[in-house]
Image: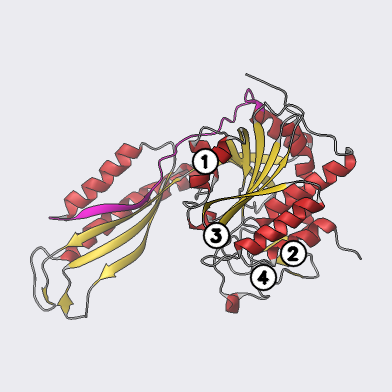
């Protein structure tokens, strides 16, 4: 049986190793340039940082003065550990059930190919008739390491501003049931370290002002807050999702030279994800108090401090939201809106004042992004292509509105 061209292109894309920290961005660019030409779309490139290319593809609308549609996909993927995979992570092996195993199968090479294959089908079915609004398909680097040399810089360029973007579709998450997930905001990433200095000495003594008790105090404060947020989610599980609360986890501790020496310093690293409805000043004041209460000289330092709290409108009066969800309703798709639990490049678009929705059309699928044996079933993938053949024209043919 001949494989669907969409599945074939998906598997070809998955075989390009764009794993951090050494992604094959130029191999990826060449593939996408050729792909665009195959579809009759003129590709273009741009680099904010040397050797970290963006790839763009543009279909001009009949009213190019109207704000455009941006279909976004990042090209990098997270590291793999091949010994834990049933099949090599860049082979794109398809088993007898149609499950395609590869890094990026869910996060998020699937979505990028779904865009293009939906456009292939649309161009064939309407004799290349243009849409009302211009569509840009954009492929960006370095999302998996924060996007600082990627989308964070790109939204500030004249190149991006000339795209005149009015609405963005970006990645979402798989759903383990039959409900599609639409992400209208995301939690802000705060990575910080707390430095606990103290008096060193022999491990047999009760040294005053030592670093250990200060670290213990910090961990107790962190765990108390963490448990408070966990209970809030647990006790309101009927109306709250993980993105609606703030999480914090200890991720690394540094300090000490040997077992019988009390160290002069411990440094604890934390990963905090703040829901955008929380007050950031209150959160930072809480961290300050943790340090103050822990003892003399305890300080904190941010490694990353996201501050974008913008929410994309999700009421029926919003034309973009209404256009997107009207398709899902017509297709009898169940869906729910959520705040994304992690960080995506959509936050940079929202920060620039552009509404963005995260949507990865994968239902009845285990969430395997960043996990061993990441896979996506070909039928789920193809259903996503079909949905985009409905969603893209609905958005791109949206008439002018105030």
Q: Which residue does the numbered mark 2 point to in the structure image?
A: 12
Residue 90 tag number: 4
Q: Is residue 241 visible?
A: no
Q: Quadrant of the N terminus?
A: bottom right
Would you place residue 52 above or below residue 134 in this image? below
Is 214 displayed left or right of 72 in the figure?
Answer: left
Question: Is residue 258 something one can see in this rendering?
Answer: yes
On screen, 137 above or below 29?
Answer: above
**What separation in Å lies between label 2 and label 3 (alpha carbons)?**
22 Å
Residue 309 on the magenta segment: yes
Q: Earlier in the sequence, mark 4 or mark 2?
A: 2
Q: CA distance from mark 1 to mark 3?
A: 17 Å
Q: Which residue is mark 3?
A: 51
| Closer to viewer: mark 2 or mark 3 | 3
Dot 4: few (<14), some (14–19), or many (≥20) neighbours within 10 Å? Answer: many
Residue occupied by mark 1:
157
Q: Which residues are magenta?
A: 296-319
Quote the CA–CA distance across marks 4 and 3. Answer: 22 Å
Q: Nearer the viewer, residue 225 or 272?
A: 272
The CA distance from mark 2 to mark 1 is 31 Å
User: Is residue 211 or residue 344 the one in the foreground?
Assistant: 344
Query: Which residue sits at x=13%, y=66%?
Result: 210
Q: Are marks 4 and 3 in contact (CB under 8 Å)?
A: no
Q: Secondary structure at mark 4?
A: loop
Name the N-terminal-most of marks 1 and 3. Answer: 3
């Amino acid at each position: 049986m001949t494989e669907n061209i969409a599945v074939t292109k998906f598997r070809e894309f998955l075989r390009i190793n764009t794993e951090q920290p050494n992604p094959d961005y130029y191999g990826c660019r060449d593939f996408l340039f050729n792909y665009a030409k195959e579809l009759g779309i003129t590709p273009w490139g741009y680099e904010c940082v040397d050797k970290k290319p963006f790839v763009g593809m543009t279909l001009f609308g009949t009213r190019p003065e109207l704000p455009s549609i941006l279909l976004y996909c990042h090209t990098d993927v997270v590291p793999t550990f091949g010994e834990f995979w049933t099949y090599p992570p860049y082979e794109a092996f398809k088993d007898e059930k149609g499950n395609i195993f590869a890094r990026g199968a869910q996060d998020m090479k699937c979505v990028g190919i779904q865009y293009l294959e939906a456009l292939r089908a649309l161009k064939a079915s309407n004799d290349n008739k243009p849409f009302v609004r211009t569509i840009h398909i954009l492929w960006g680097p370095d999302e998996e390491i924060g996007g600082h040399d990627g989308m964070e810089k790109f939204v500030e360029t004249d190149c991006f501003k000339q795209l005149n973007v009015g609405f963005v579709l970006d990645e979402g998450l798989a759903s383990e049931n039959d409900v599609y997930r639409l992400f209208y905001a995301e939690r802000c990433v705060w990575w910080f370290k707390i430095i606990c200095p103290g008096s060193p000495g022999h491990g047999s003594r009760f040294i005053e002002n030592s670093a250990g008790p200060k670290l213990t105090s910090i961990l107790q404060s962190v765990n108390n807050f963490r448990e408070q947020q966990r209970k809030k989610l647990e006790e309101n599980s009927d109306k709250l999702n993980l993105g609606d609360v703030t999480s914090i986890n200890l991720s690394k501790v540094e300090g000490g030279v040997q077992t019988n020496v009390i160290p002069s310093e411990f440094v604890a690293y934390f990963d905090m994800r703040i829901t955008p409805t929380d007050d950031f000043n209150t959160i930072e004041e809480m961290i300050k108090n943790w340090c103050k209460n822990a003892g003399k000289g305890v300080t904190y330092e941010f490694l990353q401090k996201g501050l974008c709290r913008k929410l994309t409108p999700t009421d029926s009066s919003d034309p973009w939201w209404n256009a997107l969800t009207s398709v899902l309703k017509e297709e009898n798709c169940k869906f729910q809106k959520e705040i994304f639990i992690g960080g995506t490049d959509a936050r940079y678009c929202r920060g620039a004042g552009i509404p963005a929705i995260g949507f990865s059309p994968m239902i009845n699928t285990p969430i395997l992004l960043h996990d061993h044996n990441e896979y996506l079933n070909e039928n789920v993938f193809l259903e996503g292509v079909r949905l985009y053949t409905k969603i893209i024209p609905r958005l791109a043919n949206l008439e002018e509105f105030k």
